[in-house]
Structure formats: structure tokens, C-alpha cells
Image: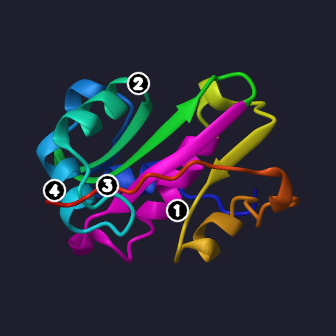
């Protein structure tokens, strides 16, 4: 990994990343995913709550207010899927997304995984800095995709 974000530099500015689910502001997460994201519009709130419950979650906080988020779905042994990554617009351009991805891929519970996966429409440059690349053999991957219906 070539990108090294300095935890201490962010912390001195009042930022923090935590996996403590008790700190998550589900209202902020739901509002962003349901109303702003291109990938989760229409997600039912109870489905989001269940997803958070069953995932490793990373919150970014500025002066104890949630400003970013990511979920990791993993068996903590062989595979992890990174999803629902966002930084609120007022806090973009500060390197927080790089810091978040670095924190995720360096997390002790996720070390040594054989495969990481994610999907993005517009953040390829961000993830490529951490070793992500297009799927080597996309013909071997399959999916069932059921989009949310926004009421």
C-alpha cells in the first residue's frame, strides 16, 4: 500500500474513526444512504439497521459528530466486502476517504484476507491507491441484484 495517512494529524484536527457501533448516528447514515447515495436510495430503515448490526462499521467523527461511514461484510478470515462508504459533502477534500479506507484495510480483524471486494461507480482512483483493481476474471462472478424501490 503506497498511501499513508497520518492518524495523529487527523486526530489533532478533531477527527476520529471508530468501529464502536454505539457511536453511530443512524439518522445521519440513513439520510445519506436513502437520499444522497446512488447505490442505496430507497433502502428501508429497518434493513439498514439489520445491515449495521451484522457488519463491521467504521464511523468518521468530527468533534463527536458523524461525518462519514463505511461497512465491511466479512468472515474475518478469507473475504471482505466494503460498502456504503461516504463522507458528508462539508467534509470532502480533506483526505478523510483515504484515511477511512486505510483504516479499514489495516484493521487487525481484517489482516491476511485472501480477497477484498467492493463496487464503485466513481471512486476507482481512491481505491486503486490501496491495491484494488478491476475484477481479474469477471466471467467467474455472478450476482442476484434486487434494487430498492424508493416510495
| Quarter occupied by residue 67 | bottom left
Residue highlighted by disc 1: 98
Question: Mark 3 Cα within 10 Å, few/some/many (few <14, many 20+)?
Answer: few
Mark nearer the N terminus (4 vs 3): 4
Residue highlighted by disc 4: 31
| Quarter occupied by residue 107 | top right
Q: CA distance from mark 2 to mark 3?
A: 19 Å
Q: Is residue 19 visible?
A: yes
Per the image, label 2 sits on a secondary structure element best described as loop
Q: CA distance from mark 2 to mark 4?
A: 20 Å
3 or 1: mark nearer the eye: 3
1 or 2: mark nearer the eye: 2
Mark nearer the N terminus (2 vs 3): 2
Residue depicted at 87% across the width and 60% down the height: 136
Residue 21 placement (x, y as % from top left): 29, 27
4 or 3: mark nearer the eye: 3
Q: CA distance from mark 1 to mark 2?
A: 24 Å
Mark 1 in CB contact with mark 2 (< 8 angstroms) = no
Give the answer, above or below, for where 80 lies relative to 120.
above
Residue highlighted by disc 3: 148
Amino acid at each position: 500500500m503506497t498511501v499513508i495517512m497520518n492518524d495523529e494529524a487527523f486526530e489533532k484536527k478533531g477527527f476520529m474513526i471508530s468501529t464502536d457501533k454505539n457511536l453511530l448516528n443512524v439518522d445521519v447514515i440513513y439520510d445519506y444512504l436513502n437520499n444522497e447515495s446512488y447505490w442505496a436510495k430507497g433502502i428501508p430503515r429497518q434493513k439498514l439497521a439489520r445491515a449495521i448490526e451484522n457488519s463491521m462499521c467504521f464511523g468518521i467523527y468530527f468533534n463527536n459528530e458523524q461525518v462519514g461511514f463505511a461497512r465491511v461484510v466479512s468472515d474475518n478470515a478469507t473475504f471482505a466486502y466494503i460498502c456504503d462508504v461516504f463522507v458528508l459533502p462539508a467534509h470532502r477534500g480533506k483526505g478523510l476517504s483515504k484515511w477511512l479506507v486505510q483504516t479499514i484495510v489495516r484493521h487487525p480483524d481484517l489482516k491476511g484476507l485472501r480477497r477484498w471486494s467492493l463496487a464503485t461507480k466513481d471512486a476507482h482512483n481512491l481505491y486503486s491507491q490501496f491495491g484494488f483493481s478491476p475484477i481479474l476474471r469477471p466471467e467467474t462472478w455472478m450476482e442476484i441484484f434486487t434494487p430498492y424501490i424508493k416510495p
